[in-house]
Amino acid sequence: MTEDRASSLPGDPSRKELVERILRVDHAGEHGAVRIYEGQLAVLGNTPAAATIRRMAEQERKHLDTFDRLLPEHRVRPTVLSPLWHAAGFALGAATALLGERAAMACTVAVEEVIDEHYASQAVALGNDEPALKAVIEEFRQDEIAHRDEGLAHGAASTPGYEVLTTAIKGASRLAIWLSSRV
């Protein structure tokens, strides 16, 4: 254990438990992201925003493929909540797309802001442990920041009710993260 992890407090997860939580929750999050974009594309079809959403969805699929590979490599089971996130992700994507292209982009901004914070905290928690996993997290974090920026560039902040919508999505995302890391 490195010095970074040696300073952990009583009740903190062990290094093994930390890695299990990270892999479990990140797998769930990438699965949810893929489903959000699938829901948005089901509604938006071939609108101007659809090409951008398809590009972001492809990156999320690559992220999911990585975690699909890492789970068995580390002998970690996925969250038991996967069926819920499968349905909820699609529903969130479709619902925001029904509100319009800018609302779909607002959803992306909200989710990616939470994921940016989440991945940053995971990198800090890993310290110098698990350098390969930390590199994956940092790479994917940069992709998520780029998605947020694309959403903003496509008018997300001009969505009517933007603050209310993004606050609700951020709260739901944080709850999903908390649950998926533990269950």
Image: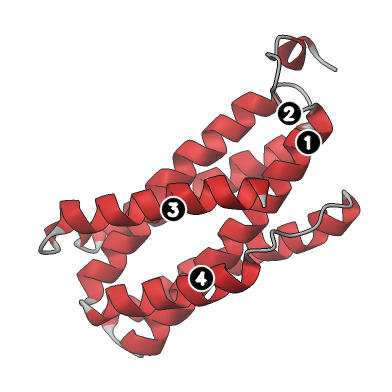
Write the residue at 23% across / 59% down: 165
Left or right position of 49 against 17: left
Write the residue at 29% across / 65% down: 105
Q: Earlier in the sequence, mark 3 or mark 4?
A: 4
Q: Secondary structure at mark 2?
A: loop
Q: Which residue is mark 3?
A: 173
Q: Earlier in the sequence, mark 3 or mark 2?
A: 2
Write the residue at 60% across / 39% down: 138
Question: Badges 1 and 2: C-beta atoms under 8 Å apart?
Answer: yes
Q: Earlier in the sequence, mark 4 or mark 2?
A: 2
Q: Which residue is mark 1?
A: 17
| Residue 67 shows up from this direction | yes
Q: Which residue is mark 4?
A: 57
Q: Which residue is mark 2?
A: 13
Of residue 118 and residue 77, the one placed in the foreground of this image is 77
Q: CA distance from mark 1 to mark 2?
A: 5 Å
Q: CA distance from mark 4 to mark 2?
A: 32 Å
Q: Earlier in the sequence, mark 3 or mark 1?
A: 1
Q: CA distance from mark 1 to mark 4?
A: 29 Å
Question: What's under tag 3, amino acid-wise?
Answer: Ser
Neighbours of disc 1 within 10 Å: few (<14), some (14-19), many (20+): some
Q: Secondary structure at mark 4?
A: helix
Q: Secondary structure at mark 1?
A: helix
